[in-house]
Image (spheres, helix red, strand yellow):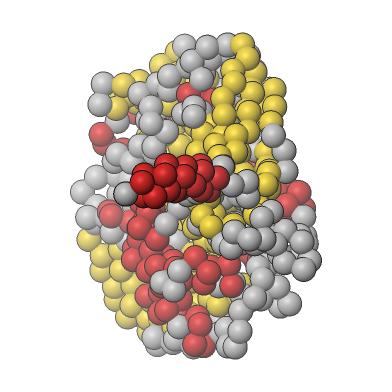
Amino acid sequence: MNIAKSVLPVFCALVVSALFSACSTEAIWVSRDQIDFDRDESPMYFHVANNNAEMGTFTVNITGNKNWIKVSPQTIPCKPPTESGMVMERIEVRIDRSRITSTGKHTGEIQLRASGIKTVTLKVSVVQTSVNPTLPPLSINNPVVTYKSPSLIEFAFSLRDQKDRAVTGEPAQFGLQAFESRRPVGTPEGLTLRRGASRQLWLSLVMDYSRYMTEIGENAIDEMERVATEALLPSLNEDALVSVRAFYRNTENSKEIVPFTVNREFAAQEIREIRSKYLPGFNSGARVYEALLAAIQRFPEEERTEKDDRYIVLFCNGRDTTGVPSMEIVREAALKKKVQIFVACLGDSMDADKLITLARSTNGRFVAADSLNTLQTAFQRIVEDLYGQYIVRWASGREDTFNIIPSITLTYNGAAASYEASKAFVPSQHLGDRMRGELILVQSETPGKNTKVFLRAHYVPYGISALQLRVQSSHSYDVALVDAIDDGLLAGWQLETEDTQAGEKLIRATGSASIPFAAFGAMLRFEFDEEVEDAFTSFVIENAGYVDGQRFVLM
């Protein structure tokens, strides 16, 4: 009993000492002990490693003690040193300045914790020169104002709410006012609000099949393909031209899977077969910027005009292996062709700082999904952004030489947003024939299957309630009106066709009301039974039926 009494205190002391020692074990190494952002809005980085060879691999949790400190990733494995040295993990730190509510210098900490390991702390400081105001309930973003003949004024923009989410109401749900230097304009000038999808849309889908994606999880690529085929493609108008490109090795350039086509079913099927049909063998590093540049180069050579919209949607892990070409080269190419780049990044975004810059500088968006469970939600934001594009257009009745400042005001659910053009409109510089309408044929092939051609209007003059065409073709086809759900200008009209002679059809569309003045959008769809190179041998717009001087020309 005396021995037990004498041994017990010593034993307890040893246990306490061992526990205290274990809790104080130093094993977390960091490359820096403080980060000073000052006024810089770019992300900063530090490295973490296990510098204790006796500890084995352990998990480190990384958190900031202020809500404006954002770290990625938040959990990492720390492996023991090897013969080559410490195994380092890179951590990205960003400052969410919208959460800082006062000006001046602010400080915080990043703590790195692991079970049984001594906690390590990094100090973070930042200088806030102004307090970010609360976002308004409705705001006009990335507005582009264009003036063109005949006296057309056009505002193209996206709408966001106070949570920075896209506003995706139908045009009829908005209130609209427009002004020319405070003078209101309206129906006589053809004032209208239309969805951006009314324009010809070109969209290139670029997909990451590299080792980085497979390391996220065995279902990562399956989920990427699912949201592309089940969320993105069904959201597009039927005349939207879609292409698909994929990359999976750092030793090979990306591959075009689907050239631009309106056949969404074909594009979806090819996406589902990418791995078995186009990307055989092993995967390795990622050529993100090569794939983006190649996708940009496939858009039409002429610069984007007010008549079409061009987008790239990139699915990726955020990591690029080669660094060639540079982000700056890709950005310049995108800006030259006016291609907006949207990025859906799956996994941590610690290597994605350049992609964030690229998306923002091309008026796109970067969204991150930290897990497969949140990919659908993140990608839905990109779909909303594509759907939340709008166009306000009217044809000014003025012909003088005064400098006019156009402006617009939209209302939606009780909220209002306004924008005033920064450049003056001089009516005399944009005069044209208001009675001359412009039409264009847009042809699309589905490789090995068939061809579709859409007749689109760039500009419609006054008083058009009928359209008559005389069309010759060496191939069999069906013709139909483009539906209202796809922003068809002739939706609800009556369509009649008559075979007048071998290979020739007389096509007549009539409506109970005129097409809105100065309108634009898809009108007719011609669907051929096979893939053809030259769809028509003759395509004539019969203008004789217009008695007030209206006429259409095929551009």
- Is residue 246 depicted above or below 411 in this figure? below
Say which of 365 and 58 sits in front.
58
**Residue 174: image location, x then y, percent:** 29, 30
- Is residue 517 depicted above or below 189 in this figure? below
Left or right relative to 85: residue 142: left
Q: Which residue reaches farthest front?
A: 2
Residue 234: image quadrant is: bottom left
Quadrant of the snapshot with the C terminus:
bottom right
Left or right relative to 448: residue 128: right
Q: Is residue 84 visible?
A: yes
Residue at the image position 63 percent from the left and 14 percent from the top:
105
**Residue 176: image location, x then y, percent:** 34, 26
Residue at the image position 65 percent from the left and 38 percent from the top:
43
**Residue 386: image location, x then y, percent:** 44, 49
Q: Can residue 185 be seen in this view?
A: no
What is the number of callouts on the image? 0
Residue 149: image quadrant is: top right
